[in-house]
Image (tube, helix red, strand yellow):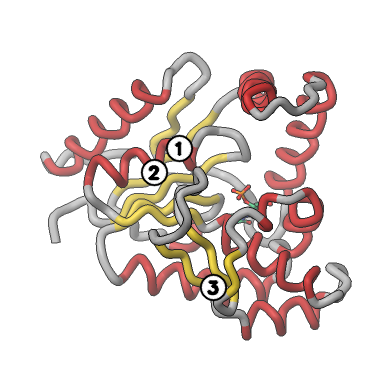
Amino acid sequence: MSKPATIAIDGFAGSGKSTAAARLAEALGYLYFDTGVMYRAVTWAILERGIDPRDEERVSEVAEALIIDVVAEGPDDGRQFTVLADGVDITWAIRESAVEANVSLVSSYPRVRTVLTNQQRRIAAAGPVVMAGRDIGTVVLPQADLKIFLEASAEERARRRCKQLKEQNKPIDYEYILKAIMERDKKDQTNPVSPTIPAEDAVILNTDNLKVDEVLGELQTLVQQVRNGLKIG
Ligand code: DC
């Protein structure tokens, strides 16, 4: 398999990693896999079953039994892919505020992380992949051929979020959004189980002043450098 066959793209919420990873995967003809949907799927499943998100034992049991599938097929309603939990289409449900509010706690449980990490490794072993998340370069695929950590300032990420909300005709409160982003960053950075930090050999790319196409261009240059045998990171 030609290198880089495994590409890890990590970064904070709103860093643009999902868009960048999806575009890179498309350009390379690789599978794109967004690991955040798995943590969201477990969170959706426990809420659906009426389980208290603080009940680590029961949450872990659900994570260990749940069958999560991410497939390309699905209705033409703006989705990038379809997420199934035990066969139920939860693509949009995992973006709702109840999931958003509890996913951080659910993803802090070691047994949840272990079972999802193992599934992610199996997916990566099956073929060339661009995998996006928080701990892909550090924990899930420490041997990845190329590791990228995307950064963007909290202010820039708040501006991007406001733009998205405006496009959806939803109310906007920049200061509130900025504060929420900063609080979430702090939680993610200091999470003792799997903090969001760049791997030692990751390339750190700041996207504050880059358009999506420019980010893609930078990533393609890095891929080319790996193909040319250059040591990256
Ligand atoms: O990227 P996202 O917003 O869809 O991630 C949802 C949550 O899952 C977020 O709280 C971070 C967590 N997550 C994680 O802990 N590890 C990953 N590899 C991916 C996401």
The residue to which callout 3 is attached is 68
Residue 163, image x, y percentages: 63, 21
**The image quarter in which residue 166 lies:** top right
Residue 133, image x, y percentages: 52, 51
Q: Which mark is residue 22?
A: 2
Q: Is residue 45 left or right of residue 183?
A: left
Query: Label 1 sits on what residue type?
Result: Thr
Looking at the figure, which quarter contains the N terminus?
bottom left
Q: Residue furthest top?
A: 209
Query: Label 2 sits on what residue type?
Result: Ala
The residue to which callout 1 is attached is 19
**The image quarter in which residue 67 lies:** bottom right
Disc 2 crowd rating (10 Å Cα; few below 14, some 14-19, many 20+) is many
The residues tagged by marks 1 and 3 sit, at their Cα atoms, a distance apart of 21 Å
Do the residues under discs 2 and 1 have CB atoms within 8 angstroms? yes
The residues tagged by marks 2 and 1 sit, at their Cα atoms, a distance apart of 5 Å
- Name the residue: 58% across, 66% down: 89
